[in-house]
Amino acid sequence: MNLPVTIWKISLEQAPQVIETGYRLLSPDEQQRTDCYKVQKARESFILTRTALRQALAKRLDCLPEELHFDYSERGKPSLRVPRPSSEFSFSVSHSGELAVVAIADCKHIGIDCEKIRPLANAESLARTVLCEVEWNRWIELDEEKQMGSLLKSWTLKEACLKAIGTGLAVPMRDLEVRSESDIGLQLVTAQEILLTVAPWALAYFEQVSGYQIALAAAGVSKKIAAEFYEFHFDG
């Protein structure tokens, strides 16, 4: 048995009228958050990502996008308040560069992260904050080009795990180890109780979009992830 996950790919390069229409669709608190952005590109990315999230969830739940109301955890992880879905339903969003992604699944905890492939400044210093000792020892044996890809992949996978349970970087990434086993695929190893209490974990990594790395993490499931990617088109 697999865990089906729907992933919407959203281009953040949109015409001004799409952005303006999206802004009007947002709730007053979302509009207030939007107005706090000082950088125009960040503001537009937030509007488009939230609009796509509302429209994608509305399609799944057979309601209007403006009928959706969200609650937020202490660390900002959103969940649906209205309409209230079953307990086995979750979603996650991420954006980087000109791409946003929305993941929707019938499980309690799902996390997605996407990262634009790019050179990483101070890679060795960053690696020490992201990689556990076992991963670090493997990483330093790689050539410089492979180090960049490996580090970004580790970051993306671990970020997806932390987003699934809504801790953010309150849990240090170096406390997690991601192993790749030929027979069972990607596995999460950690001593952090907050991640162990929602085990087992299912992880998946994709290069579906040129120039980007995408990772998925689902907690509390003993199934493999079966993701289907779709191009998102804004309504209206």
Image (cartoon, rainbow, N blue to C red):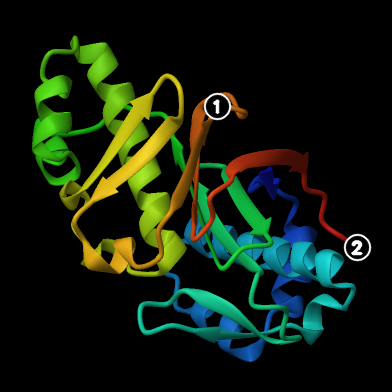
Residue on which disc 1 sits: 207
- Depth check, front residue: 117 or 61: 61
Answer above or below: position of 44 versus 31: above
Answer above or below: position of 85 versus 124: below
Could you tell me which quadrant the N terminus lies in? top right
- Which label sits on residue 236? 2
- Depth check, front residue: 199 or 93: 199
Q: Is residue 56 left or right of residue 192?
A: right
Separation (CA) of disc 2 from disc 1: 30 Å
- Depth check, front residue: 217 or 102: 217
Q: Are marks 2 and 1 in contact (CB under 8 Å)?
A: no
The residue depicted at 73 percent of the width and 70 percent of the height is 54
Residue 93: horizontal and vertical position, in percent?
A: 56, 58
Could you tell me which quadrant the C terminus lies in? bottom right
- Which label sits on residue 161? none
The residue depicted at 82 percent of the width and 65 percent of the height is 60
